[in-house]
Image (tube, grey):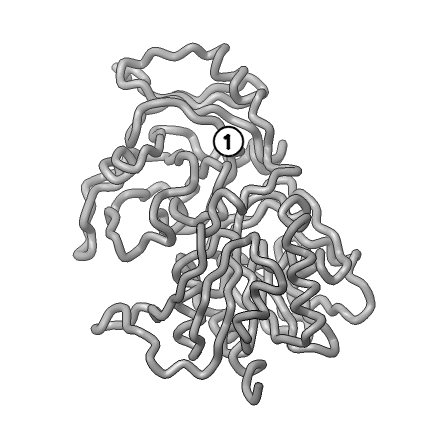
Amino acid sequence: MAPTPTACLALADGTVFYGQGFGAAGQTEAELCFNTAMSGYQEIMTDPSYAGQIVTFTFPHVGNVGVNPDDDETQDPVAAGMVVKWMPTEPSNWRAAERLSDWLARRGRIAIGGVDTRRLTRAIRQLGAPHVALAHDPEGRFDIEALIARARAFPGLTGRDLARGVTCAQSYRWDEMRWAWPEGYKRQTEARHRVVAIDYGAKRNILRCLASAGCEVTVMPASATAEDVLAQSPDGVFLSNGPGDPAATGEYTVPMIRGVLEKDVPLFGICLGHQMLALALGGRTVKMNHGHHGANHPVKEVETGKVEITSMNHGFAVDGQSLPTGVLETHVSLFDGSNCGIRMADKPVFSVQHHPEASPGPQDSFYLFERFAASMDGR
């Protein structure tokens, strides 16, 4: 006899998936996306770019390596919940400090296992990222009509500025570098460049990569003005990843970016930072059908023809056709041809849609941090 369902996922169109709950009990609503990465579920759940989203993992072995404090990308999970094929097994990894289910429960995040994630992923690809409600009740009591109503009432991500909810409250310094065996995380003590990093929801490993590239990093809130940034006398400015609609966040960040550009300071952006830069340069952004989320996305560098396998997490994209004269498209997705990078023709200003910090994911694009550092040499 099949066990009584203790969790369910209700889509706004009335479709309901039942399964077994783990993590925290309760209810939540969000946009549903799928991620194709085969590792890094902890980094994914703590990526601030997933604010307002529940993640379906297409890889079934989620929870098998447990969790540990070193792999958090921010202090607490940001994704609203997770959907998996199989229930988590006992962790089997020397770095495991806690079970995934216990970690989720302690952090107040809901999860459901035993779901046909292939069917769910096909639905997302065909119909777009749906609005959903996820419920976990150990007694198996669900008001399905109320859950569907909650899913339909979810406002979605279009038009919403979510960066304010995940940015830092005040400025701080960062000097921790990338993890390396056997030392672990070392500190940057011989920085060559001063960099201001604007935190729209910055992942820790991005900041580590900047430090490893020789940067003394000052992290500033998303609301920082051009005057605030330039008062730090930076050699370069970095625009971080983050959640939500770039057009909404751009209402207050685009003026800051344009003010920095007027001073000819080298600038590098990733993910939402890439989209912010495109808006500041006169381009536009669009909502994607189901977005790109995974660690296996092929991206071509236009000028060289080189193909990189990259990590991605975005539901909005820069419209490559909207880029003005003087702004060049540098990278494109080999999945759908969407824009994945831009640069100014006459200034050391560039950005990419993918995540070169590889947390989780491949390391093909680490060179971008060195390129940013090189652009600041001699300043």
The residue under label 1 is which amino acid type? Ala
98, above or below 177, in the image: above
350, above or below 134, in the image: below
User: Going 68% across and 56% down the picture, which residue do you hit?
Assistant: 254
Q: Residues within 10 Å of mark 1 (few under 14, many from 20)?
A: many
* Residue 379 shows in this picture: yes
Observer-nearest residue: 125 or 143?
143
Q: Picture coordinates of residue 147 (x, y %)?
A: 48, 16
Observer-nearest residue: 225 or 102?
225
Asked which secondary structure carries label 1, the reply is strand
Quarter where residue 209 is shown: bottom left
Query: Which residue position holds label 1?
Result: 30
User: Going 24% across and 69% down the picture, which residue do you hit?
Assistant: 184
Q: Picture coordinates of residue 88 (x, y %)?
A: 26, 37
Q: Picture coordinates of residue 192 (x, y %)?
A: 45, 83
Q: How many marks?
A: 1
The quadrant of the rendering that contains the C terminus is: bottom right
User: Going 70% across and 50% down the picture, which residue do you hit?
Assistant: 285
Outermost residue toward the bottom in this view: 378
Observer-nearest residue: 213 or 339?
213
User: Going 27% across and 14% down the picture, which residue do you hit?
Assistant: 139
